[in-house]
Image (spheres, rainbow, N blue to C red):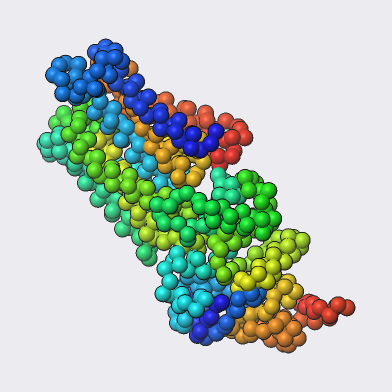
Amino acid sequence: MIELDGIALRIGGRPLLSEVNAQVDNGEFIALLGPNGVGKTTLLRAICGLHPIDRGTILLDGAPSHDLSMLERARRVAFVTGDEVLLDALSVREVVSIGRFPYHRWWQWQESERDEDAIAAALEAVHMASFAQRLFSTLSAGERQRVWIALGLAQSTPILLLDEPTSHLDVRVAHEILALLRRLAANGKSVVCALHDLNEAAAYADRIALLGDGTLLALCEPTALLGGSLLERVYGIGMELVRLPGGRLRVFAG
Amino acid sequence: MKPTLKIIALVALVPACGAASLLVGSTPISPVQIAQQLAHPHVPGVLNDIVWQLRLPRVCIAAVVGASLALAGAMLQGMLRNPLVDPYLTGVSAAAAAAIAIAVIAGVAASATPAIGFVAGLAAALLVAALARRGGGIDPNRLILAGVSLSTLFAAVVTLVIIGAQSQGYASTILAWLAGSMAGRGWHDLAGIAPYAGVGGLLALASISPLNALRVGELRARAVGLDVARAQWLILGASSLLAASSVALAGLVGFIGLIVPHFSRRIVGSDARALLPACIAIGAALCMVADTVCRRIVAPAELPIGVLLAIIGVPVFLYLYLRPASGAARSSGL
């Protein structure tokens, strides 16, 4: 569970977000939406301790984040980002095994049985078990994204944060990843995922968190958000709402 | 071959190369005689003196120098995620060279120069680290810029001192030190420096897990709980101690700290649990062999080890890395 109470964030000295209050329950999948530069990535980084907070309190499963050591925090929350780095020499399994870092002291270099199980389960969850010995550098963008998610899963945390995991991916791979996140939430994880595609968010998330005007404007079920005018105001563009025969909603901009 | 077997094979190289080095010298000594002298360290005699006071300390110094430089190079390359980095990046060698050059023309006793080089090298590393400081950690780009800038400044000082020293006849002494050599070094020098190299080695052990986490980038390493700032200071401290120890023992021995980590990565991969032991073994073995060749190739004179390593090593390195990549080479990521 994540609880945000009066969070304010700065970036480069200027205020970015203020008065962000939210609660994400166990087993819930939250899609984090908002225009470019509104603070989605920074908020995710702040939740997992990678960006300082200016004011407010973050509770991770009931514990104040600032009271946790970096290792303790990494055992509660995993952060998945798609930023590219050179990893030429690493196999897929080696990348995923780094997710076990929080469970080792500096002199504990050997993987335990629990580590091996967690790595195998993480690879299995993203359907990359057969790629374990492949070089990371030889993977496609979608496969790499799944490996980064597996790294986060190997951390065995109750909270999973993801920064635009479907960007640059084709429709099928994006669907697979979102369906995977949906399953992870169904199994009890708190999943918060920054997305750009409103329809992806509406189709998979339990609730949508909308950032705009320097704060959290809404945290509600997709139907409640898609039907109103708030999205048009935040994105500054007209939107048309279409209800499909099955009852699902689709939004089209313009 | 499994990584563990590869490490065992590489570690076995060290005593093998050490034994071979002990056999080579101006006085022919058979393997049996060497073994007898090693088994009886306190028996008076010429052979005992040659083995225990001349050859063995030199072999040990070569091993420490090679292992230290290779280890420091691997750690800095891993921390900065830059394969072009070598242990002298932090200005250790340039500052030591400048300090020793000044000490030589100032008439400081030769026995004091290793200590002067060590202190100056470590001080330069601290200065570079202070200049590269950002927040609580170290900015890799600032570290490289500060290291290169200060090294250039110290190199200019060395050049000035050499120009001035020519008239006083000291230039050859300074140049010999700059070219790197273990000639004239003994147990006393090793005993003075070994504790610092030992501390550097222990800090390197503590750097294994951080180095592995840093392989996926600084941001992800922080996300899995690594205190990156603390890891950077740890790695920088360890590599500076190791590089300064090496400079104090043998002057400027280039090439090993840059190239051995590359070769080691080709053999055992980039996992620091295997990479660091492999660097220690290959660095020690290479330095022992090179020093032995330097002692004999133009006997009774000696070739500077840095010169030999560059003449032989650079073409080999270029051949290995500029030829079309094989499957194994590609998989090493180099």
- Position of the C terminus of chain A by quadrant: bottom right
Observer able to see residue B79: no
Say which of A234 and B18 sits in front. Answer: B18
Say which of B81 and A44 sits in front. Answer: A44
Q: Position of residue B327 (x, y in %)?
A: 62, 35
Q: Residue furthest front?
A: A113
Residue A227's place in the image compared with B221, above or below, is: below
Q: Position of residue B60 (x, y in %)?
A: 28, 30
Residue at 50%, 44% (x, y): give it.
Answer: B270
- Position of the N terminus of chain A by quadrant: bottom right
Image side of residue A211 versus residue B196, left or right: right
Q: Position of residue B21 (x, y in %)?
A: 32, 22
Number of disc labels = 0
Q: Position of residue B315 (x, y in %)?
A: 47, 27
Image side of residue B325 versus residue B77, left or right: right
Residue at 80%, 79% (x, y): give it.
Answer: A249
Residue at 76%, 63% (x, y): give it.
Answer: A171
Residue A209's place in the image compared with B197, above or below, is: below
Residue at 64%, 76% (x, y): give it.
Answer: A28
Observer able to see residue B312: yes
